[in-house]
Amino acid sequence: MSPVLSVRNLSKNFGGIKAVQDVNFDVAKGEFLALIGPNGAGKTTCFNMLNGYLKPNSGGSVQLNGKELLGTPPRKIWRMGVGRTFQITETFLSMTVLENIQMALISHHRRVFDMFSRATRLYVDEAMALLDLVSMSEHAERACSELAYGDLKRLELAIALAHEPALLLMDEPTAGMAPSERIALMALTADIVQREGVSVVFTEHDMDVVFAHSHRILVLNRGELIAEGTGDEIRANPTVQEVYLGGGTLFEDKKEAANA
Amino acid sequence: MGFYFAQLLTGLANASSLFLIASGLSIIFGVTRIVNFAHGSFYMVGAYLAYTIVTALNGGIFGFWFSIIAAAAIVGVIGLLIEMTILRRIYRAPELFQLVATFGVVLIFQDATLAIWGAEDLLGPRAPGLDRAVRIMGEPIPEYDLALIAIGPAVLAGIWLLFHKTRWGVLVRAATEDREMVGALGVNQAWLFSAAFVLGAFLAGLGGALQIPREAVSLQMDLSIIGEAFVVVVIGGMGSVSGAFVAAVLISVLNAFAILIFPQISIVLPFIVMAVVLILRPYGLFGKPGSEHVGTEEPEQPLKLMSQKSTMVLLAAVMVLAFSPAVTADFTSILLVDVMVATLFAVSLHFMMGIGGMVSFGHAAYFGVGAYAAAMMVKFLGFGMLPAMLLAPFFAAAAALFFGWFCVRLSGVYLAMLTMAAAQILWGVTFQWQAFTGGDDGILGVWPAEWASSDKVYFYIAFVLCLGGIWFLRRVAHSPFGYTLRGIRDSQTRAEAIGVDTKFHQWMGFVVAGSLAGLAGVVFAFSKGSVFPDTLGIAQSIDGLIMVLLGGIHALAGPIFGAVAFVMIEDWVTRLDYWRFIFGGIILVVVLLAPDGIAGGVNRLIRAILPNQKGGAA
């Protein structure tokens, strides 16, 4: 089966610094792919090139179902079927939870220039279904500004799923959350992803989250892809251990603890 | 050659006083993030004080320079008092509040100055010892100009030393970069802000005091300098003192030469330069993005459709309005037309600022273009009233399309400044282009058609157009278009991440707001029978801001309350002596006591009286 996303020769220089060098990978349909690496490894740079905020060096290619993403502005990448969540949540704080989802649907149905309908009456059922998906329907009428951070994260996930994306890009999805919330959010994400058949690429610092939920892990260091494999393979990989700890063992198996 | 050199020296001399006032403004903005409209008043008061002290002392060279410094020092003390009593309370309020509050101070100063020094222009003495002209390359150059040329760089050097060699100066620079961090490091911000404000006021006072040998001291000094001072600060980069110097020199020297080629240009030149600079360098020549305005506004509540009860109240109010001409005198109908025009203008401004998050200091531009387009169609093309009314808003839309394209590329206070520049350019063109626009004399004889000439009939025309416009804007506010605008205001990143072309959408929002302001202008033109350049002026723009602020920016009903209150208060207060003083006082009281405006205040009152009900006049 052809991959949903295929990244070829992705590189980025900032002046003389090679932030990302010649990165290649594929993402299969329904795959949950983690992008990890120490600080400064190039994760965020990589991510910002995928979602259109950064322009890579020429020569690379990022294709979504065979269509080139590079050189496309973020809003068009979204239209092509890429949803995204942010490290620090970005939502419309002056709207209700439901309206936030309705906005994504209004844009998806290309009605942002409609000046005569009542925005709050559009796509209510679809929006409620999405809120159900993230178990937020009882919060539908609440003001977004009153939500707890964990709920905002779930809301953002629902927004990102509104246009039935083929790919979800999640930048540090559990940053700023309590450990128990992290696991819950990622379990929810994994569950939805499996049901909807969406592929996910996410960056993450919390190794418990990474090992508990990703199907495959890519490790970046100094802008280069140094390892790739399942959780067990990565844990056992000497290069990765070298990078993270300068040798020695790494990442005790917390999988059981995480699943408990 | 000598002539051109003389022009250059004149330009440099002008640059010095412009630099003094602009540097103070820039320091105050850098540290406190307040756009201080009252800075022109400090300048004016500095000049008046210097005049009084110089004439009282009458004491030669020493007396003259002592008077200048003393005047500036007194202005510094006045600045301290204002900072401590007013501004200190509103540092965390939205920019709009601060701007309007400082405008209240401007009004109070205007009448206080009038009461103390009278309405006559005052001619100051020449500077003793510098009262002749010297010949340079054959051209006579006033000695005092040469002194000014030296004073500008000297003050710049002084500020540089202060900022780089003293602990206080380092703190000021640090606060300009990131005032949250400076606060976190345990610096007493209140004291730092006061000190920066005193320095800024002192410099403005000095700039004004130094002008007395060059120009008559008059009550118009404040507003005539403030526009240009803003421009200099924005071109230089807000918070940058050396930027202010470069910008002051750039503008003054360009102006000195440009008037040789095209004498009318001096009114608009600074604004054109500013527009060009902002488009090329969005933060000005030496500016950095820097720390944003940090306000602790409560997050806005979601929009609600009106409750049945509020709808009934509103309908009742509209009905009363509709039948009012039957029972009231003609002058009441005329006043009510003013109210409706002001309300549509305020609602259109609120659409742009409240819904769209784009603060405009120059919304009068589109009001004025609508008014002028209608007047010119009637006057020069012989159009009837109805076709002119129908077509004129499209001219306002075209102006908004043109200027909006530039404005939406910026954000925050820079966007606001560019809107002001746009309005000033249009104002300047209208004012100068005598043959086409009638210049200062305006266009007279723009009367409604025969059948609509009675005040009562015209009332109904205004009623239909203004209420229709207000209804339309409310409708749009609740539509996907309006929601998307609010979304962009809340989070540009999120809006983009759900596929919205944010700049284009804001641009269209700008055009909608401009068109409806234009419609208000059209109704205004026919109700007055004439149009004058003031319809595009700063004062008209600020009136709109005050209305929006009076009503409260967070409620759709806000501008309606605000405009009605504004016109009523203005109608009553302007009959009194010293009405500016009273009006400025009212503004300050509202800003300090009801920071969420009348609508917000009423809501709070309802909630206080009926604790179980949620007051939601959205």
Image (tube, coloured by chain):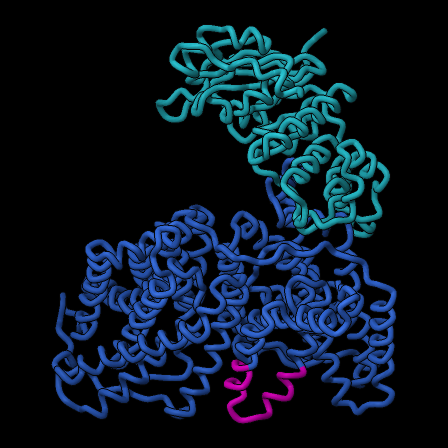
Chain colours: A cyan, B blue
**Residue B359 place in picture, x, y as percent:** 57, 59
The residue under the point 48% across, 55% down is B293
Q: Is residue B569 magenta?
A: yes
Q: Does B110 appear above or below B556? A: below
Task: Identify the residue at image location x=80%, y=85%.
Answer: B454
Residue B379 occupies which quadrant of the picture?
bottom right
Quarter holding the N terminus of chain A? top right
Q: Tell me: residue B438, above or below residue A225.
A: below
Describe residue B387's horizontal placement relative to residue A40 as left or right.
right
Quadrant including the C terminus of chain A: top right
Q: Quadrant of residue A15?
A: top left
Q: Is residue B386 magenta?
A: no
Q: Is residue B276 visible?
A: yes
Of A181 and B522, which appears nearest the observer? A181
Residue B510 visible, this angle = no
Which residues are drawn in magenta? B568-585
Q: B312 and B222: which one is in front?
A: B312
Q: Residue at x 51, y 90 (%)?
A: B578
Picture coordinates of residue B52, whole percent (x, y): 28, 89
Which secondary structure is most common in the magenta stretch? helix
Side (left or right) of B582 relative to B375: left
- Horizontal side, residue B414 vs residue B158: left or right: right
Looking at the image, residue A9 lies above or below residue B559: above
Q: Position of residue B593 (x, y in %)?
A: 57, 74
In percent of width and height, residue B132 lies at 15, 80
